[in-house]
Amino acid sequence: MASPKHSADPEYKLLPHTRIRQAIGQRTQASFRDIPQFWSAVLVNVEVLVEVREARKEAGAHAPIPSYNDYFIKAVASILGNHPRFNAWYDQQGLKVLRPINIGFACATDEGVLMPTIFDADQKSLQQIAQETTELIDMARRGRLRASLQQGAGFTISNIGPGVVDCFQAIISPPQTGILAIGSIKARPIVVDGVVVARTSVYLTLSVDHRAADAADAAAFIGDLIARLSERQWLEQQ
């Protein structure tokens, strides 16, 4: 029996690109085309972070309870001053190292991903950061996030949140020189004292503009961030 004929131009439903989606496409295309990017990834034991956050929730801390992303923003802000090449904008004349530590974070909306900014993140408490991110996310998802609240960041965090994706690579937002991708936090096998055990962990992947920094710079940044996320006393004081 002969198979039915099929049109060379099958039927389809057109989903027009939104203004935000077009801007994302143009920006990411320019990033991949113009920036020589490399990636450094590491699996991090975050048992201490999870324990501290759970204790904060059980103690009835003031709302909103800081999310894991809020902890990451605070941790990155606390070390970024020691890694100026990642708190910078690339320019052909030189690297513009920023004085303030402003951190952008990826926020998923129905229209596409937006990048709100936490200004002077190193000078704010964890609770202040949690309050701001809550308000910024709400504005972004209601289509009320002003352009001025998406500018000025020297570094960006992209957290995929809970789910099936363990690890991913984020695309640098020019003229920034780095972005940190945070995978899902879940139990994974980790070797501890020569024994394989289950520990709550997360993959961190740092994307780096190779014109601004090298692998040694990336390793130093990641090493300091791991130390911060493992420091119980510091986490409890935030």
Image (cartoon, rainbow, N blue to C red):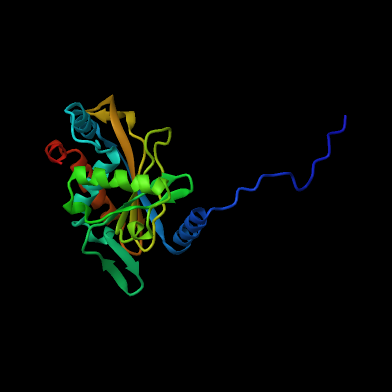
Q: For the image shown, how many numbered marks are present on the structure?
A: 0
Q: Residue 176's quadrant in the figure? A: bottom left
Left or right of 7 in this view: 192: left
At 30% across and 33% down in the image, what residue appears?
Answer: 201
Q: Is residue 15 above or below residue 189?
A: below
**Is residue 217 or residue 155 the one in the foreground?**
155
**Is residue 125 or residue 192 the one in the foreground?**
125
Q: Is residue 6 visible?
A: yes
Q: Is residue 169 visible?
A: no
At 27% across and 29% down in the image, what residue appears?
Answer: 191
* Residue 23: percent from left, percent from top: 48, 58
Q: Is residue 224 above or below residue 183?
A: below
**Is residue 15 or residue 1 the one in the foreground?**
15
* Residue 76: percent from left, percent from top: 24, 49
Q: Quadrant of the C terminus?
A: top left
Q: Residue 213's quadrant in the figure? A: bottom left
User: Which residue is farthest bottom?
Assistant: 93
Left or right of 9 in this view: 229: left
At 53% across and 53% down in the image, what residue appears?
Answer: 18
User: Which residue is farthest right?
Assistant: 1
* Residue 1: percent from left, percent from top: 88, 29
